[in-house]
Image: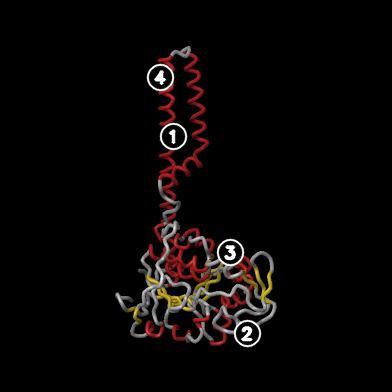
């Protein structure tokens, strides 16, 4: 619930629990009456306080496999309502993942246009996941965007992959000691500068497109595009809203939200797709009409007036063929967009019905 100056928690609020240092000192049990989504290896802390979030997400393909056994235990114990996991981990989990509680992110992303931003991070896409389930208000906790790329005890492996070879209790990237332990594998947090912040910028554009309000409860976060609320007040009688320190950057990434618009619109883009997909048809039409023109020219002994009429007729016939092909192409694209929209809405209604959450 919000007005112009004050915001407070409601049944339509979801909390995304990042694992940054700003989460240290926050009593997660105070969130037990609300909908929460926890991420990655934070289960190690939840086990020490005997607490679980409502949902769980792990979207890093390396991290997921590295914590396969622990994630399997979380599924089997039955305390978390739903899991958003990558396809490679689901395949490894086998029968354990064959439950309505486990959602395949890769499959869901193909149906839910809200999840399409190309830079995938567990935090940003967990927020988008909450939006697909109908939450109107999302609060970020522990989303700091401040990473030390190489921590003590880690060694390089293939590509951008790292492995913890020695457990170091203190880790500047996380809110509790021993978050990462010997044997854990993961990717460099930002394989290119600002990747995580960039992912939140893209997510913010998507959330704007469906009128979802998002707050950050860390006023020093590098993710500075969201208004700030004080978490204790937000959970109580309401928190004053402090404006975002930075505007959401405008990029070429379309904010398509739940509308499932599909490919980029615009005459130039559409014409390019038409030529690419209908090139063979256009070439065939040009060949047939060209051959007919040569034959007609030969029969008319290449006299100027009959030849001119032949050229005009050929041009008209080719234009007519191109127009018919373009019309068919446009109708096909429109029907595909409608089908995508129907699939997206059907999946959303199914998720809401299964999980029992309020719909906006």
Q: Nearer the viewer, mark 1 or mark 2?
A: 2
Element at badge 4?
helix
Q: Is residue 165 above or below residue 311?
A: below
Is residue 146 visible to us here?
yes
Element at badge 3?
helix
Q: Nearer the viewer, mark 1 or mark 4?
A: 4
- Contact? badges 2 and 3 (CB < 8 Å): no
Of the two numbered discs 4 and 3 on the same chain, state the one appearing first in sequence.
3
Q: Residues within 10 Å of mark 4 (few under 14, many from 20)?
A: some
User: Tag on residue 322?
Assistant: 1
Of the two numbered discs 1 and 4 on the same chain, state the one appearing first in sequence.
4
Q: Position of residue 88 (x, y in %)?
A: 61, 64
Q: Position of residue 206 (x, y in %)?
A: 42, 63
Of the two numbered discs 2 and 4 on the same chain, state the one appearing first in sequence.
2
Q: Nearer the viewer, mark 4 or mark 3?
A: 4
- Contact? badges 2 and 4 (CB < 8 Å): no
Residue under numbered circle 3: 87
Gap between marks 3 and 1 measured at Cα: 42 Å
Q: Position of residue 159 (x, y in %)?
A: 66, 64
Give the left or right position of residue 312, taking residue 298 as reference. left
Element at badge 1?
helix
Q: Residues within 10 Å of mark 3 (few under 14, many from 20)?
A: some
Image quarter of residue 240: bottom left
Q: Position of residue 323 (x, y in %)?
A: 41, 35
Q: Observer-nearest residue: 245 or 197?
A: 245
Of the two numbered discs 1 and 2 on the same chain, state the one appearing first in sequence.
2
Gap between marks 4 and 3 measured at Cα: 61 Å
Residue under numbered circle 2: 169
Gap between marks 1 and 4 measured at Cα: 20 Å
Q: Residues within 10 Å of mark 1 (few under 14, many from 20)?
A: some
């Amino acid at each position: 619930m919000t007005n112009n100056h004050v915001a407070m928690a409601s049944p339509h609020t979801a909390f995304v629990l990042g694992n940054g240092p700003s989460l240290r000192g926050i009593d997660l049990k105070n969130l037990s009456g609300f909908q929460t989504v926890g991420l990655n290896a934070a289960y190690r802390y939840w086990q020490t306080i005997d607490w679980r979030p409502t949902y769980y997400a792990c979207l890093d393909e390396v991290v997921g496999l590295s914590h396969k056994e622990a994630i399997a235990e979380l599924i089997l114990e039955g305390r978390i309502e739903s899991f958003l996991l990558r396809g490679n981990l689901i395949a490894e989990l086998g029968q354990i993942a064959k439950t309505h509680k486990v959602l395949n992110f890769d499959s869901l992303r193909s149906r839910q246009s809200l999840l399409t931003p190309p830079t995938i991070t567990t935090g940003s896409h967990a927020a988008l996941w909450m939006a697909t389930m109908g939450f109107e208000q999302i609060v970020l906790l522990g989303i700091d965007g401040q990473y030390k790329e190489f921590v003590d005890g880690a060694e390089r492996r293939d590509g951008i992959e790292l492995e913890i070879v020695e457990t170091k209790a203190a880790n500047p990237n996380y809110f509790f000691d021993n978050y990462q332990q010997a044997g854990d594998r993961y990717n460099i947090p930002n394989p290119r500068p600002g990747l995580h912040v960039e992912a939140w910028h893209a997510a913010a554009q998507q959330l704007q497109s469906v009128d979802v309000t998002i707050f950050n409860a860390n006023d020093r976060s590098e993710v500075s595009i969201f208004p700030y609320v004080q978490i204790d007040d937000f959970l109580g009688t309401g928190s004053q809203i402090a404006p975002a320190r930075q505007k959401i950057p405008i990029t070429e990434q379309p904010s398509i939200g739940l509308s499932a618009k599909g490919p980029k619109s615009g005459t130039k883009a559409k014409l390019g797709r038409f030529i690419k997909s209908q090139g063979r048809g256009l070439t065939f039409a040009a060949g047939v009409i060209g051959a007919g023109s040569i034959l007609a020219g030969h029969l008319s002994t290449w006299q100027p007036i009959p030849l001119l009429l032949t050229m005009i007729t050929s041009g008209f016939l080719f234009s007519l063929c191109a127009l018919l092909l373009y019309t068919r192409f446009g109708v096909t694209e429109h029907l595909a967009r409608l089908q995508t929209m129907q699939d997206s809405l059907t999946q959303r209604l199914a998720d809401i019905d299964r999980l029992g959450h309020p719909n906006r």
